[in-house]
Amino acid sequence: MEDITTVQTTLCPSARPESVDGVVFGVVAGTIAAPRVTYLKQPLPITDEVMAKASPVTPAEIFRTAASCAESGCQHFDGKDCHLAMRIVDKLPTVVEQLPPCSIRRDCRWWQQEGKAACMRCPQIITDHYSSSEQLRQTANPSMIFADLIMAVKTG
Ligand code: SF4
């Protein structure tokens, strides 16, 4: 599979984990009330093995994944701008004081469009938010998953 982060493309930073040619670039840690993404130093291609690490929650609850922006194929895109990025900047508070160390920034649609304002809000974004139980999400053990993915990046 071609690494989409090495080719010229605009990435959606809230793509579904099922996306073709997607990559994992963050793991959702924090709490249910205050989720915070921990960003991987390097994006990892989505594989069955990586997705299996999300259990017992679903990959979209614990991973942030990026894939090529679908542009006109996406309900949020008006042909010029991503309205999801605009709403995030408009409606959500900032949750960090410095730019998060994000490996997809160069190609991120939200960054290209909204700049720092999107990045300062980005760590609170979860693709799917099904598991209202703190215990269930803690069972997925984000810190262990993050450590596993760091190892996968190093050995990959
Ligand atoms: S908005 Fe910023 S922090 Fe979030 S994925 Fe894009 S570049 Fe990374």
Image (cartoon, rainbow, N blue to C red):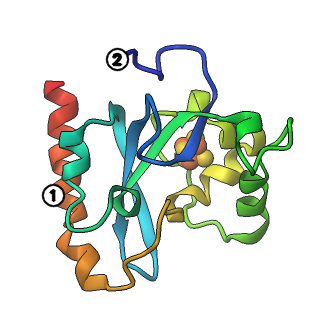
Q: Between 18 and 122, which is closer to the camera in this rendering? A: 18
Q: Is residue 8 visible?
A: yes
> What amino acid type is highlighted by mark number 2?
Met
> What amino acid type is highlighted by mark number 1?
Met
Judge left or right: residue 43 versus residue 98: left
Residue 65 place in picture, x, y as percent:
44, 45
Q: Which residue is mark 2?
A: 1
Residue 1 place in picture, x, y as percent:
34, 17
Crowd class of label 1 (few under 14; some 14 to 19; many from 20; radius 10 Å)? few
Q: Is mark 2 within 8 Å of ligand 1?
A: no
Q: Is residue 99 visible?
A: no
Residue 131 place in picture, x, y as percent:
37, 78
Front: mark 1 or 2 = 2
Location of residue 153 (image quadrant) = top left
Using the numbered discs, state the Cα–Cα distance from disc 1 to disc 2 in whole angstroms: 26 Å
Judge left or right: residue 9 versus residue 5: right
The residue sitting at 43% across, 34% down in the picture is 22
Labels 1 and 2 touching (C-beta < 8 A): no
Location of residue 41 (image quadrant) = top left
The answer to whether residue 8 is above or below residue 138 is above
Q: Between 4 and 155, which is closer to the camera in this rendering? A: 4
The numbered mark at residue 144 is 1
